[in-house]
Image (cartoon, rainbow, N blue to C red):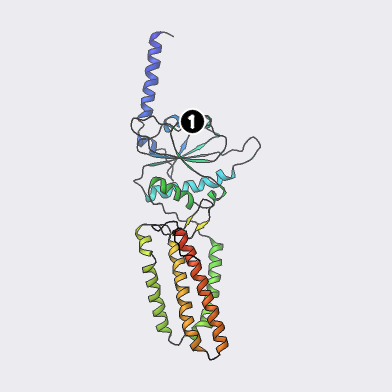
Amino acid sequence: MNLGQIWFLWVTILLQEVSYAFLDASEVLSLEDSNGVIRVTEDNYKELSQGLPDYYAVLFITTSKSNKQGLICDMCNGFDPIFQKVSAATHQQVPDSKVLFLKVDVSENNKLVQDLGLTTIPHVLIFPPPEEGEPFSWQKSAFYQYEMSANSVKTPLHFADFLAKVLKVYIGINEDFEYREFALYFAVFVVAFSLFKRKVLPLIPNKAKFFCMLLSFGILMLSITGYKFTQMNSIPFIARDPKGQIMYFSGGMGWQFGIEIFTVSMMYIAMGALTVFLIVSPKSTQESNGASLRTTVIACVICYTFCYFIGCFKIKNPEYPFAY
């Protein structure tokens, strides 16, 4: 190879590297599918792996084929629709956010396996935007890693919550309608309503006054339990912990889930109703022994409910000293 050929080869490589460094955003965005996911192939791997200025890269590493033992990656297949759903929700709800959702199949791209030294799958890696003047690549740059587990494929809420914290945005996810859960709650509601109509309603002398008082009390509860705080800050109604379990109480006094409002309201209502019943009960019966027993039971239930309330409060404020 003569000097001219060496010079031509060097210039070609230099121009290729420069073209990767100044990758056009419109070219990359044109690769997105209907859900906003870009499929990483061997042809575009090198340019995509060097990042896009100002853009986060959410990389889902999966496989579509079985391993040498013939085992299929069930977690890969289960997480794929969740990844697609969160990508679509992010693009729809936060269209101005600069984030790329990329999916790479290791059975079709061996270069990624070699660069990252992968021995297991699946993985979800989130690379922050490359800083100006700093070298960037998936092989060497720092990233956030989403912890994959069996619970990760059950609901998109946990992944969406993790991604929202990294991107510092709010991502709302509409979960699929659960017919079994709906049927269960519907049956419980019908039973409770029937018991209320047959047993409780006949005991109420002034029904109009009772329901007006109930409505006023409900509005009061929404006002004092933090509903407006949750609404104004776009805090989700339900969140899940790393194990996939529902979190009824958030840690810290500056954060409150929507379900926490209703939980606290129910405890307030229960303690208030028991206190009123404790006052009214002795006056409504002439049997002193029965009234004493009833009063003792109600007082014990109030004490237990209050202790449970304090225990819940300690979740938000562990240093609270007045606990039982």
> Residue 227: image x %, image y %?
38, 64
Q: Quadrant of residue 23?
A: top left
Q: Identify the residue at horizontal 33%, vertical 32% (top origin).
A: 132
Q: Identify the residue at horizontal 53%, vertical 82% (top origin).
A: 295
* Closer to the camera in the image, 159 or 262: 262
Q: Which residue of the protein is positioned furthest toward the top in this rendering?
A: 2
At label 1, which amino acid type do we have? Glu
Location of residue 115 with respect to 194 vertically, above or below:
above
> Residue 104: image x %, image y %?
50, 37
* Closer to the camera in the image, 11 or 257: 257
> Residue 36: image x %, image y %?
42, 44
Location of residue 248 with respect to 20 vertically, above or below:
below
Q: Identify the residue at horizontal 48%, vertical 51% (top origin).
A: 158
Asked which secondary structure carries label 1, the reply is loop
Q: Which residue of the protein is positioned furthest toward the front in this rendering?
A: 321
The mark total stands at: 1
Mark 1 = which residue? 42
Q: Which residue of the protein is positioned furthest toward the bottom in this rendering?
A: 286
Q: Is residue 54 visible?
A: yes
Q: Is residue 249 visible?
A: no
Location of residue 211 with respect to 251 vertically, above or below:
below
Other residues around mark 1 within 10 Å, as few (<14) / some (14–19) / many (≥20): few
> Residue 99: image x %, image y %?
39, 42
The N terminus lies in quadrant: top left
